[in-house]
Amino acid sequence: MMSTVESCAEVGEDPAFGWRHAPSLKTLFSLINRDGEEVRVVGGALRNSLLGAPVSDIDCATTADPTKVMHWAQEANIRALPTGLDHGTVTLIIDDRPFEVTTLRTDVETNGRHAAVAFGRDWMKDAHRRDFTMNAIYMDAQGRLYDPVGRGIEDARARHVHFIGAARKRIEEDYLRVLRFFRFFAQYGERMEEEGYRACIAAQAKLSGLSAERVGAEMAKLIQGPYAARALDAMHQGGMLTGILASVPHLSRFRRLQTLARALYLKGDLTLLLTALAVDVREDGERLARKLRLPNRTRDAMKRMAQTVRTLRSVDEALLQQLAYEHGKETACNLILLALVRRQIDPDLTELSMLFRDLALWSLPVFPLNGRDLIDCGMKPGPQLGERLSALEKAWVSSNFELRKGQLLTLAKAMR
Ligand code: ATP
Ligand code: MG
């Protein structure tokens, strides 16, 4: 096993690690690397650079305790937010970029949901309380990599999701790791640890004790991962997916959607993916949103999509424009994709991308009539007028936006 005090590789000028030269990160290093303290980058940023995925946020680990970090930041006029002081996390905002800086920790007590932690100075111990080998890699200010558990770099490169230590024990400490296992596989997975998989499946009954927010956050990331279909298949084979989603999942529909979206270079959004996977009728959307504590906006969008998709009979420009007028352009495209995968139709990809491109360029028409026009024709103001106006707008949309103002007014009179 690699020693924790020795680095085992240098990233040098590898372009995948180009972010390490950001002035904000330099500021962070010089803020904390002093008086015998040290800060290193850890986790997602290194994992992603090693396996060739983009880096979003940068998490750091340090020997300095949180009060010291807060104090130094204040001295240097750097904004420091105590975002998780009890578990040692301070967020520093440097040049508008947030850095989560967490003091090295050892879990002293775990109960499957929360861990009591002690601050420490031991990189090895800090590494061993992390979840997967690919998440326990560190980098210092000189670009030297450290891999205290000894197989992190190799596993990251091989996209191999592997627990640190004995999977069953690590899962008992924190059952969320079951979902994180599948989530990382969905995002980066080439391989998953077999023993880890078995331990996850064996622990599934314990997931009901987790908070809906935490389950929802992991599932949202999982479902948007490039390998989500494979991760969901694996979960379903282990018998755990129906319980998590509170409905029977449509896995082949989901797989078709992922393939179609990828072929069109679209990033399927969460609402679309969830609806395809598990929402057939409005009640499914309601239940799923509750189960995963999704925002009301997502819940309503899923319900609306599930309902609207049932009415779609064809895929053509006119329909797409009408949908875009009513639901927005993005949802219109999503509805078409959903309709295609639900009916197992393999569309002509060139034709479909041209349709979507034309829609992106299309400017939404403006309804040529308003309440005033109806009053001028002798209608009384009131709720009825509003109803009539929206009936006329519907007629106008169905005419493919072709009815002119005069024609609409004639229609309005005929409706009396
Ligand atoms: P992302 O790109 O999704 O942010 P990440 O690896 O940074 O990926 P986070 O959830 O931000 O994931 O967690 C940061 C790091 O903290 C992880 O890389 C891992 O080392 C550790 N970690 C997070 N959650 C757990 C957990 N439940 N058990 C053990 N270690 C964890
Ligand atoms: Mg992170």
Image (cartoon, grey):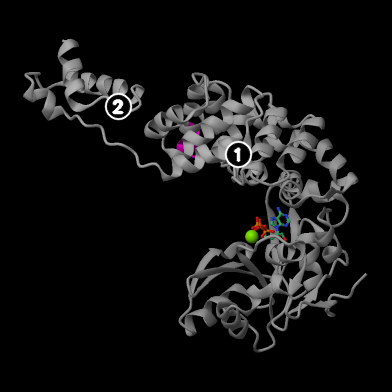
Q: Is residue 386 above or below residue 359?
A: above
Task: Kindly state the secondary structure of the residue where label 2 is placed.
Answer: loop
Q: Is residue 301 visible?
A: yes
Magenta span = 295-299
Q: Nearer the viewer, residue 238 or 317?
A: 317
Q: Is residue 302 above or below residue 64?
A: above
Disc 2 target residue: 402
Relative placement, left or right, of 407 versus 101 is: left
Image quarter of residue 43: bottom right
Relative placement, left or right, of 397 versus 46 is: left
Looking at the rendered image, the quarter that the N terminus falls into is: bottom right
Q: What residue is drawn where x is 77% and y is 31%?
A: 236
Image quarter of residue 343: top right
Asked whether disc 2 touches disc 1, contact meaning CB atoms under 8 Å apart, the reply is: no
Looking at mark 1, is its residue's CB closer than 8 Å to ligand 1? no
The residue furthest bottom is 35
Tally of numbered tags: 2
Q: What residue is drawn where x is 81% and y is 41%?
A: 200
Label 2 and label 1: CA atoms lie apart by 28 Å
Looking at mark 2, is its residue's CB closer than 8 Å to ligand 1? no
Disc 1 target residue: 350
